[in-house]
Image: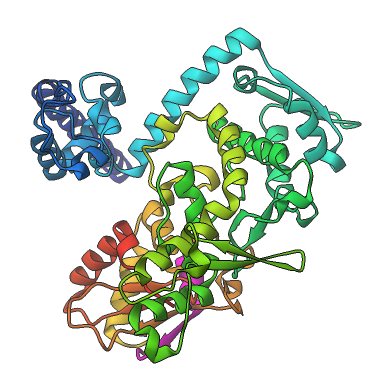
């Protein structure tokens, strides 16, 4: 009788959950026609290009300047993000119909949750892949496991973009096996390591050795641009086919992939010491720190120093208090863009052959890293065990709140937190006891933010893997501030 009662109780719970799901779906279905009608009326009509000569340039740059009622649309989307995400989860096809503005307008994209964006993206690339497979069939590669990178390079460089979208079938020479997906995973895993092989001179690692950006001296390899295009194709193919790569690039390269201009804050992850020197230039008078600068920089290539002008005649133009912000912007632009422009272009040429830039633009730079490399498995207990405290004690109630909040985060939120405090979603193979910083192993640390007022936002120093944690009144307030920091974190990074 007890067993029967338990079974009835379980059955009742399942029935209750099913009814709840059905009632939620029904409620969403009732909202959908009205919301679709609003989107059609508001976002499907555009102004003539010359109809509003007085509109601000920022509106045009934002990507919604020509939409009639754009402000009304943005306000509606921002206020109803929970409802809109629920609608899309329930019926993702609406993003291809009346509610296309959610993926087309940059201000609308930001309200979509990562899992919603990822599902829409997968649907779009799956259609392209199926179309290509029907036209061109499969791509069969029979290669030597010991020479995967070179053989794949020579085999795939002659394939067209349409052919590359076909289904990949890998066999390793002198090995038995049918590729049901496992051999392709091995193939991409090997390529993800080999693309960073110093012998190819394609990429250089940042100070912490965890992320990579194109090598400005890659021309030591005479075929370097062809190899960059190949690497771009491999990353694009992996993204399009749903394979994950253990490959983590700098934030500035992710921005280039999304058509976003890097900012000087992105220099922190590449060269923290140089970044702090730039911060000193911005924060103090040049006279007080004894610096005489010109609009030029010196490049060292294979032992030879070359002076590069940052603007025409730059080596003769002095940096002053009035123009030093321009100098910092130009010198960072040179390091992250101009000096590696050809490499970036070749890489993007290959990547865009497989992934349409309009499709990938739905993601933020942080989300793009997760699309390429996957959501990490973050062991909060291991992170806690390998955390150091400065100004706090492990027994403080606020620290107890912090770990309670961390333990209740979703997998997406944990990944966003790791990116916020370390600059990358990469988890060390040996656990957080081996977390790398700019000076080797550098464990995660929580510092008491003594200079911040109560309730201020927490901030991170990615080069030191550290978090500045202010004093909060409650666990709920701490959770709210942490979620805001990791979601809007671009504005909360600090100089290390």
Q: Is residue 297 above or below residue 409?
A: below
Look at the image and tell me in which quarter the N terminus lies: top left
Q: Residue at x 40, y 30 (%)?
A: 358
Which span is picked out in magenta? Answer: 378-392
Q: Is residue 342 visible?
A: yes
Asked if residue 335 lies left or right of residue 90, the reply is: right
Please say if 167 is above or below 150.
Answer: above
Q: Quadrant of residue 176?
A: top right
Query: Which quarter of the picture shows residue 480?
Result: bottom left
Image coords of residue 286 (percent x, y): 39, 84
Q: Residue at x 37, y 73 (%)?
A: 494
The extreme right residue here reads 174
Q: Position of residue 94 (x, y in %)?
A: 25, 22
Quarter of the picture holding the C terminus? bottom left
Res 370 seen here: no
Residue in front for this viewpoint, 88 or 452: 452
Residue 279, horizontal then vertical, whole percent: 40, 77
């Amino acid at each position: 009788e007890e067993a029967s009662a338990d079974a009835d109780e379980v059955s009742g719970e399942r029935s209750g959950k099913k009814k709840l799901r059905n009632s939620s779906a029904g409620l969403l279905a009732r909202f959908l026609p009205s919301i679709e009608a609003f989107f059609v009326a508001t976002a499907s009509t555009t102004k003539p290009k010359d109809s509003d000569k007085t509109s601000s340039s920022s509106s045009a740059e934002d990507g919604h300047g020509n939409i009639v009622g754009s402000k009304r649309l943005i306000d509606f989307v921002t206020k109803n993000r929970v409802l809109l995400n629920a609608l899309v989860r329930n019926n993702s096809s609406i993003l291809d119909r009346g509610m296309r503005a959610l993926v087309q307008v940059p201000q609308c994209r930001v309200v979509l949750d990562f899992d919603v964006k990822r599902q829409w993206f997968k649907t779009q690339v799956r259609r392209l892949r199926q179309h290509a497979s029907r036209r061109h069939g499969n791509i069969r590669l029979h290669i030597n496991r010991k020479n995967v990178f070179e053989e794949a390079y020579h085999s795939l460089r002659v394939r067209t973009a349409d052919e590359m979208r076909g289904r990949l079938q890998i066999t390793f020479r002198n090995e038995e096996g049918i590729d049901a997906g496992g051999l392709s995973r091995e193939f991409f895993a090997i390529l993800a390591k080999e693309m960073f092989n110093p012998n190819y001179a394609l990429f250089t690692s940042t100070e912490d050795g965890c992320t990579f950006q194109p090598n400005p001296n890659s021309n030591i390899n005479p075929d370097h641009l062809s190899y960059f295009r190949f690497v771009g194709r491999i990353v694009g193919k992996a993204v399009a086919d749903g394979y994950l790569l253990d490959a983590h690039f700098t934030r500035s390269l992710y921005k280039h992939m999304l058509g976003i201009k890097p900012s000087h804050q992105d220099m922190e992850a590449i060269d923290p010491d140089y970044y702090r020197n730039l911060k000193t230039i911005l924060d103090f008078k040049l006279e007080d720190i004894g610096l005489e600068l010109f609009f030029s920089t010196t490049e060292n290539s294979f032992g030879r120093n070359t002076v590069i002008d940052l603007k025409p005649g730059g080596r003769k133009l002095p940096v002053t208090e009035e123009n030093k912000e321009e100098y910092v912007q130009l010198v960072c632009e040179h390091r992250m863009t101009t000096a590696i422009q050809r490499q970036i272009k070749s890489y993007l040429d290959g990547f865009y052959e497989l992934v349409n830039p309009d499709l990938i633009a739905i993601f933020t730079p942080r989300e793009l890293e997760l699309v390429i490399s996957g959501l990490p498995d973050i062991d909060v207990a291991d992170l806690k065990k390998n955390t150091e405290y400065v100004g706090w004690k492990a027994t403080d109630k606020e620290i107890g709140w912090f770990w309670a909040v961390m333990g209740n985060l979703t997998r997406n939120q944990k990944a966003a937190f790791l990116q916020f405090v370390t600059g990358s979603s990469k988890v060390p193979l040996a656990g957080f006891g081996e977390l790398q910083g700019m000076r080797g192993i550098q464990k995660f640390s929580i510092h008491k933010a003594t200079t911040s007022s109560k309730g201020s936002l927490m901030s991170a120093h990615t080069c030191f893997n550290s978090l500045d944690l202010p004093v909060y009144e409650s666990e709920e307030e701490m959770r709210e501030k942490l979620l805001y920091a990791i979601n809007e974190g671009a504005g909360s990074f600090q100089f290390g």
